[in-house]
Amino acid sequence: LPGRAYTEVHALVRKLRPLVELTSDELDALRSVQVQIRSLEGNTTFVNTGEKPTLCCLILSGFAYRYRILDSGRRQIFSIHIPGDIPDLQSLFIDKMDHSIGTLNPVTVGLIHIEAIRQIITRYPRIAGLLWRETLVDAAISRAWMARIGRRNADQRIAHLLCELFIRTSQAGLSRQGSVPLPITQTELADSLGLSGVQVNRSLRQLRTAKLIELRTGTLTVLDWDGLREVALFDETYLHIRAHVA
Amino acid sequence: LPGRAYTEVHALVRKLRPLVELTSDELDALRSVQVQIRSLEGNTTFVNTGEKPTLCCLILSGFAYRYRILDSGRRQIFSIHIPGDIPDLQSLFIDKMDHSIGTLNPVTVGLIHIEAIRQIITRYPRIAGLLWRETLVDAAISRAWMARIGRRNADQRIAHLLCELFIRTSQAGLSRQGSVPLPITQTELADSLGLSGVQVNRSLRQLRTAKLIELRTGTLTVLDWDGLREVALFDETYLHIRAHVA
DNA sequence: CGAGGCCTTGAACGTCGTCAAGTGGAGTGG
DNA sequence: CCACTCCACTTGACGACGTTCAAGGCCTCG
């Protein structure tokens, strides 16, 4: 696991900027943070349950996910992360990981020392607020995840998750003509949704034959957004998307 | 809905103190916050989806819960809150509620202006860190909630939730001889666990006849902690409990 | 050309949901 | 003090949705 290049935190700045107008002091502080770039293979766990991380990872490209293997041996996936996300920002204040983080496909991350972030948030309360907000939106997404698993049938669960991922990836600028990258297997979908792999397959077929979506070779194509949204009863309020400030 | 008494934020200070030694400046800041006490009846919603709150509530006594009614009409409960919790701390940085908050039984809350909290966290980064940490532990509990719903059968779900609530209420100093207050109906348990009320009833009977617990008149009694824990495959790491500093 | 993932599909089974009826306890009013 | 009401809890019967088991197909990569 190589990598040693130090660079600016462009991805992070690009994400925070629309929320608040950063002062030049704040920008300088963010840009002076040392970031170590690392390339990870697909289908690899790079943060383990029980660890006490000293680094945080900013996803620069690729998809990651948080999960935990229960004592029963079954896996639950808690969230899926796209470029611009910092899936383990919680390590700032919680020292022991209660879950693991892995990659869905090849991922490049920017590793940042937690201490460096701590210094910045101590000096720049507004940056602290922006990062805090990130963790709160993450929690809101978790609530939607719960409702999905708890109170929806198989078709609705899949449709709802696909709606969310389609919006989030589009928001991150990854969409092209109704298609977004989504390098996820049916087994991973199953472990996200509390279903069996077989059932995910059947429900996907439903959505496919209803001409709502296509999902092949790591790409999700939405053929009928309104139809998909209706199946899922999707309401994106919980994503707390703010219009980009010009 | 009366109430106008202003008082100190004892409950909050008591909770934060074990985590970090607060300076006298920090303590003074916390104690100077104006808190409006309000009494709420049981089974009442006091924060609604879609609102933009200007106040945060610190629970002083009683039990509250976060939930959302889905478009299908079904309810999903996301979390249960006990005295010392601030269930809507997210309002600090997220302006529109994506869920509602209600009471399980009569509750007294301390209402605090969000602006007041914002001023404190801007000036006192360590207090900001403590509150931030609260929201992160809340997120960790949400993840356990997901795994419960997604990858456990009915008996395990109930046992696991009861384990969590028993520990948390005990931690808050509410236990007496193996019993803790738990004023929750079977319907509310069902909406927490993604089950039907009938199934909750059956599974509770299982746990009762196995001599693991009793749950009557708002009180949970754990008769066989190890047995309950074993059914649930419970591991409390995710609660991130820190030993109290003397 | 062979191996290993991942996807696909069928059949049988089981857990849990739905429907329905009845019990019990607390609070209310005659 | 005793009906009466309301609500939570309880239990049985039945059916559905989703799981499990098993087998086969497809694609990619070595």
Image (tube, coloured by chain):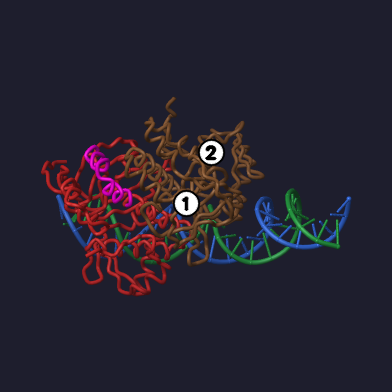
Chain colours: A red, B brown, C green, D blue
Position of residue A221 relative to residue B105, above or below, is: below
**Magenta segment, prevailing SS (helix, strand or loop):** helix
Left or right of residue A52, residue C9 in this image: right
Residue A6 in view, yes or no: yes
Q: Position of residue B85 (x, y in %)?
A: 48, 44
Looking at the image, residue C4 sits to the left or right of residue C9; the answer is left
Chain of the residue displaying label 2: B
Which quadrant of the figure has residue A227? bottom left
- The amino acid type found where label 2 is placed reads Thr
Q: Label 1, on which residue? A: B149
In this view, which residue lies farthest toward the top? B246
Q: What stretch is highlighted in magenta?
A: A115-133
Visible residue check, residue A216 = no
The circle on residue B167 is: none
* Element type at mark 1: helix
User: Is residue A151 part of the magenta span, yes or no?
Assistant: no
Image coordinates of residue B81 in percent, x first then y, are: 51, 46
What's under tag 1, amino acid-wise? Ile
Q: Which residue lies furthest to the left in this view?
A: A5
Q: Which one is in front, B96 or A112?
A: B96
Say if mark 1 contacts mark 2, CB within 8 Å: no
Residue nearest the observer in this picture, A149 or B143 = B143
* Chain ID, mark 1: B
Report the residue at 24% width, 37% height from top: A115
Q: Picture coordinates of residue B40 (x, y %)?
A: 58, 51
Looking at the rendered structure, whether the residues under marks 1 and 2 are on a common chain is answered as: yes
Q: What secondary structure is found at the residue carrying circle 2?
A: helix
Is residue A203 positioned above or below B189 on the image? below
Which residue, given by chain and number where applicable, does mark 2 sit on? Answer: B169
Left or right position of B121 against D8: left
